[in-house]
Structures are given as C-alpha cells and as structure tokens.
Amino acid sequence: IDSVIPLQSRELWKKHEVKKFNNGDEFQRKFIQHVETTLARSLYNCDELAAYEAASESVRDNLIIDWNKTQQRVTARDPKRVYYLSLEFLMGRALDNALININTGDEGDETSREMISDAVEQLGFRLEDVLDQEPDAALGNGGLGRLAACFVDSLATGNYPAWGYGLRYQYGIFAQKIIDGYQVETPDYWLNLRNPWEIERSEIQVRISYYGHVHREQGSSTLSPSSWIGGEQVLAVAYDMPVPGFKTTTVNNLRLWSAKPTTEFDFAKFNDGDYTNSVIDQQRAESITAVLYPNDNFESGKELRLRQQYFWCAASLHDILRRFKKSRKPWKELPDQVAIQLNDTHPTLAVVELQRILVDLEKLDWHEAWEIVTRTFSYTNHTVMQEALEKWPVGLIGHLLPRHLEIIYDINWFFLHDVEKKFPKDVDLLSRISIIEESSPGRQVRMAHLAIVGSHKVNGVAELHTELIKTTIFQDFVNIYGAGKFTNVTNGITPRRWLRQANPQLAQLISETLEDKSDRYLLEMSRLTGLAKYADDLEFQKRWDDVKYHNKVRLADLLCRLNGGVDVISRDHIRDTLFDIQVKRIHEYKRQQLNIFGVIHRYLSMKEMLAEGASIQQVAAKYPRKVSFFGGKSAPGYYMAKLIIHLINSVAAVVNNDREIADLLKVVFVADYNVSKAEVLIPASDLSQHISTAGTEASGTSNMKFVMNGGLIIGTVDGANVEITREIGEENIFLFGNLAEDVEELRYKHRYHNVPLPETLSRVLSVLESGAFSPENVSEFQPLVDAVRQHGDYYLISDDFESYLASLALVDDVYHNQRSTWLRKSILSVANVGFFSSDRCIEEYAETVWNVEPIRET
Ligand code: CR6
C-alpha cells in the first residue's frame, strides 16, 4: 500500500512516532496499559493468563516497531530475498524467546530478559509462571517442522532478507493423552485464546481457484497461453508472525495463510431458495486450513491435503511476485531477486504455478519461463523412505487443477526428451526417472522428481543422507545432471532456544566461564571450544554436574505437576540415577521397540539374579539406578507405533510396581511430548537414544540438542550422528550396530534364511508372548514379536540387539564408576557442538544455494 499521507502532515507523524520501551518502568507502563485497554481488565482481576497476555502485547509492540523498520529497510534496498516454503513450522512458545532476543545489541538499548523479569515481579508475578501460560504453536509434526522454526530464527539473527510461508492451521498437532496405557488423540484448538503473536492482515487476501476447465485458442497447443476458468474459489488471508533475531534489530516475517470464504454467493443455489445451505457450502472453505495432517515421514494422499498444498503455494507465490513486480524489473531477473526453498516436496506445486503464471498470464515463451522457474527454486529432501515420498494420482490433480496437470505433462515431456538425447534408447531409464509413474491402479505424479527437475539445487540434510540419496533414490538424476546439482547442508538447531532458553543454568555457567557477559557465544558457537580446557578441572566438573542435577530436579518437578502433585520418580537418588531419554515421534524405524526390549532384558536379568539368590546390592552393582524416559506421538493411524506406546506403558506398570527391584529401574512415558516439554526434558538427560536402523534417519536434530545440553548419546551410525561423532570425538559417544552399507544384505538374509536370534532377544520375545506384560490379552504384543521372528525383521532389531546391550553396559559403567570421565565427555561434547548451530547451516544455504546476502542496519 503506497502512502497517502500528504507531505505537510508527515512532520506530525514523526513527532508522535511510537517508541519502544527501554527500561523496566516503561515496560510496566505498557503492561498496565494493555491490561486496562487491550484486555479490559484491571488491578483487581489480572490473573497469570492476563499477565502473560499483557506482557506479550508489550513485548510485541517493541518487536513490531523493529519489524516495520526491517521491512522498510529491505524494501528500500531491494536485495535478493529468500522465501522458505514449509507446510510446518513447529514454533513452540514465543514470549521467552522474544525476551532473550529483546536486547538488539544497539547502543542505548537497555532492555534485557532480567530487566523484564524484575519488572514483572514488581507487578506481582513470577516470570516463570507467566511464561507457562502460553500454549505451544504446534504447527508441525516433528523434526522437519522444528527445523523450519530454527531456520527462521537463524535467518533473522543473520539479518537475511527472508520470509517464511506456511499455513495457519486452526488445529495444530493433536494433544496426546495416555489412557489405560493407550494413546488417545485430542484436538489442539490452540487459537482458543487470543494469540498476541500474530497480526491479522485482513487487507491481504488472495483469491485461490480449484477445479473448472482450461480454455485455449483453437488449434494452439498446451504450451501456449491458456486460460484456466476455475470453479470453486476461496480466499487466502495473511497472518504475520514477527520473528526476532538475536542481538539485532532485524525482525523478519513468518506469513501464515488462513482460508476464508469469498463474499460472492452461489446465485444458482440462492435462487433455488436454498439460502442456508448456500451459506454452509461457503463456510466449508475454512476447512482447507483447519487441520495439520498428523503424519511424520508418511504420506497418506488425501485430497484435502492436496488442496492445502495448492492453496498455500498459490497464495505465497502471488505474494512473492507482487513484491517482485514493485521493483519493475524484467521477468528474467526474477532469479536474481528471489530464491524459493522447497522444504521437502510439499510445496512442489509452486514450481508448476510459477510456470503457469509466466506462460498463461505473463505470456512468456515456455522455455524462457522454464529457465526462470528452475533458477528460482531449490529443494531439500528429508527422507529416503519410500512410504514418505509424495505421489499424487494423476486423476486427482487433473480434477482439482486441470491446467497444472497439462503443465506437469509438458514439463515431463521436455525433460524426458532431453534425457533421451543424452542416453538414447535407455527405455528403462526413462520410465525410472519420469515424473509420471505408470503404476496400477492408475498413474501418479512423483513429486520428488518434479521438484528435482524444477530446481537448480537439491540438498540432503546430513552427509550420510546426502550420500544415500545420490546413490539410491536420485542416482539417475546425478547421472543426468551431474553431481554439482546435489549438495549437502547438514541440519542445525538454534542455540538461543535450545541452550539459552531451555537451559539457563548451563548458559550462565558457560558465559561466566568464557567471560562472555553479553553471550556472544550464542552467535559464534566456536567460542565454546574455550570450555575444553576445563574438561578435567574437578571443581568445574562439580559445577557442571550441579547444573545437570538442577535440571533433573526441574524435570522431576514438571512430572510431579503433570501427575497431579504426586512424584513420578523418587527424589532420593537423583544424583546417582542415570536419566536415559528417548523422545521423538514413535516410528518403527526410530526403534523405540529396541529400547523397550532392552529395558525388558534389563528387568528380566535383574529378576533372574535375585531368583538365583543375589543380594540387591549385587544387582545394583550390575544394573545401577536408571530411569528410562520415553516420549513421542504416534500418527493416529499407525498401528505398530501405537502398539509400541502401549508396550512401553505396560512394561512401566510392571517394573515400576515391582518392590523387589527396589527402585533401581523405572520406566516413564511422558505424555504429549512437544516443544515446551522438550525444553525441560533435553537439559535433564544424562544419556539420550538415537538408535534408528542405519540409513533410515535422514539427520535427526534432537541428537544435536541433547549434545548441546551436555547429555551423552547412544546411537547408531546414522544421520547426523556421524558428524556429531566427528565433531565431538568418537571417545565421547556410544556408537553401536550395523552400518548402512550392510543393511540391504542383512535384510536379504532375513528374507531368505532362517537367521537364529541372539539368546538375549529370544528370551525377551518369549516373555512378551507369554503375556507377562499383557495378562488381560496374552497375544496383544504378538505383532511386535512377529515383526522380528516372522516378517523378516525389517528394522534389524535382532542384528543390533547384542551390540546395543554391550553399549548400554558400558554406559552404566562409565556413569556410575567413572563419573569424572563421564563429566569430561559431557564438557568436551558441548565444547565441540558449535558446528550444529542453525546459523552455520543458514550461512551454507545462503552461499551455496540461494546466493543472498545479509542486510544490516547502516
Ligand atoms: N521426520 C527426518 O526423518 C530430519 C528431519 C529434518 C525428517 C529427520 O531425520 O532430521 O526431517 N524427515 O530434516 C521428514 O520429515 C520427511 C523428519 O523430521
């Protein structure tokens, strides 16, 4: 919107310019103003929730002032911009993060988190309780969505002119309840409370069409400009979330689209006298952005999901191009002004939509348009697993988006044509790489192929993963395009949230030790190497250990609160109890079943020792104190994952109530694992488990979070574990199991030979079959047994079981008998974790994929 304020009035505007609060007093004034006017409450009825809202509104005011300036600065300079398209942004809470970022590092900026904490306390509240009022913005499933959230944080921190684009789901990922040991899903209607972190842009609306038909001049081909006369129409309305950077005034934007009905009416229906039904029909438009699909690493191919994808791609592209057009540059310069990153294949329709806009609306020649498209897009792959690779039935796309299907066919035709010239007569190759899969019952569009063909760069998310995509699922494309198109950008995490915010005690110890009062290390993580020289310092080790102890107590407190004030774990021995944590989505490939089988093995072995007359001290010497924590959601329709959850809870019920083992072993399933719970769980871990079948976990990112918080890792040689080992040193990580390169052969053996199981695992499975953990339904866990014994043990539980147990035994020994060695490992891990900052990761994208530069305040 261009300014309409006459010049002579502008002085007045500047005189009344809105100012940020800059000290506790000014913050309090804003706070009270918001309590009284925004919330229409007062001193007499301001509870913690109102305090949270008023504090958020006040902080938001500061952010918005910087947000405006950032946008003005970028508009004035008009540099190349980055757009990160992600169907998921798992943001978590915003207030604490904003408080950590509130000091811009500028001269004269007196604000700080401590200042606000004091100011809030003077007003009669504890900051921690106020922060606890905020619901998580849980618009994502797992790693992919949280990665996008870390990326927007690092983009703002690095002062990149970058926007995120996503959907404003009314229901985020479901809340998980555990009832009788089973997962029960309940809806997460997170917008129930007013959301102070979004700005509704009701003036920014984009009209989105579906269905209808394509019209063209007689005799012209699908390559020439065509008009798509859409049938159904809905509106996309923008909601903006400010994303503040750390120690900078840059506040970037995350734009989320929400679906609304158009204001026009279906006159045919109206005239039929069916006014009410006509309104109801219109109302259905809102269902497009109603709910986040709750699958992680699995595609279900539902029509509504495709509608979501197009809605979001079309609205975002429209917005991006509108901004580009303001600079009046020719279309061929689009790739010099705009980089669009496809987070997985979910936004691949944007490739087709841009081609459609350029050919049909802007009347560019097909090939000229296609050159622009491919130079604009780049694509990140996040999995090699077949069941997670998106494919859409041709019929469905043709029905919903008839013109787009024509364009996909034409893209494919030119692509196959070029390949055929290069590799004549390789019919097999052509059918392997085709964007269209000729499968029964019908043809499907392979979105990954379309994304590769439509992008100039394709990246994997960890070195091993990138190597795997280049040699397996995308091998043909490497032969066609050359290896240069494929690159690796190892994932990262933001140290602001995952160290400073989640672990204030450790952050404090680090800044003190590094004599880094202003926390520069959170920007330059290589400074952490300065901790290494204290790795053997016993006094420092003690302080390090105290922080961990504090965080373990904090977790015990949280669990107690969630359990209605009753302790879940005993307070008596927290310092000598190993907190062993596996939290992530429940998935067979992530192998929570391996973990729980290990727990059962431990329990059976303890019982066996006792039965053979050993004393409890002797048992404790071999199996010292440990709590096994599990947490994570299963997709609602994923039978095996739900069974694993029930098994964990069933084992917990038996083990936790067995007086004989005297609290030496406990099993805890933490319900409803989410970002805020992660912020408490991760800092409390002594050990965490990242034990996927080698070659299946593309990267993993919680592994990085645990290491950043001084936890040690037990893991397979998979995903980013490989690079974590390289960075922190192999003596500081517990690796076990078969390698990715051996997986195929092992699976083959299981399929065609009768491979005997190790005795240890055999015993566990037999006890499961006996119904010891499911007395009411003896065969309940049979499917988990059969997966190993009868169905080829696809996830190689049996092949890795023994080395897993050996590794766990080593963990016990070092933790309980060589605590100083353990602490040394922990300190050295943190000292060398710097590589995994998402700031490094974003810099790599900026340089090697996007070709964009930061815009700093001058
Ligand atoms: N499920 C990978 O499985 C990776 C993230 C982010 C995943 C995980 O290993 O760390 O992406 N893949 O790159 C997909 O979502 C398809 C994930 O989170």
Image (spheres, helix red, strand yellow):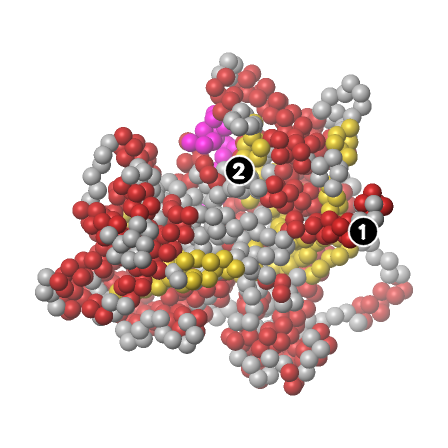
Marker count (numbered) = 2
Q: Is residue 473 magenta?
A: yes
Structural crowding at the residue carrying mark 1, measured as other residues with C-alpha within 10 Å and reported as few (<14), some (14–19) or many (≥20): some
In this rendered view, identify the residue nearer to me: 139 or 421: 139
Q: Are marks 1 and 2 in contact (CB under 8 Å)?
A: no
- Above or below for 143 versus 374: below
**Residue 461 place in picture, x, y as percent:** 46, 44
| Label 2 secondary element | loop
Q: Amino acid at mark 1?
A: Tyr
Can I make out residue 115 in this image?
no
How far apart marks 1 and 2 lie (CA) works out to: 39 Å
- Which residue is depicted at the point 34% across and 57% down? 648
In this rendered view, identify the residue nearer to me: 720 or 614: 614
- Position of 116 compared to 402: left or right? left
Splitting the image into 4 quarters, where does residue 218 fall?
A: top right
Residue labelled with disc 1: 275
- Which residue is depicted at the point 52% across and 21% down? 430
- Position of 51 compared to 264: left or right? left
In this rendered view, identify the residue nearer to me: 217 or 738: 217
User: Which region shows up in magenta?
Assistant: 472-490
- Which residue is depicted at the point 68% across and 26% down? 367
Residue labelled with disc 2: 390
Splitting the image into 4 quarters, where does residue 851 fall?
A: top right
Indicate which disc, 1 or 2, sits on the residue closer to the N terminus.
Answer: 1
| Label 1 secondary element | helix
- Which residue is depicted at the point 31% across and 57% down? 776
**Residue 706 place in picture, x, y as percent:** 39, 58
Splitting the image into 4 quarters, where does residue 681 fall?
A: bottom left
- Position of 431 compared to 820: left or right? right
In this rendered view, identify the residue nearer to me: 224 or 8: 224
Query: If the image is split into quadrants, where does the N terminus sit?
Result: bottom right
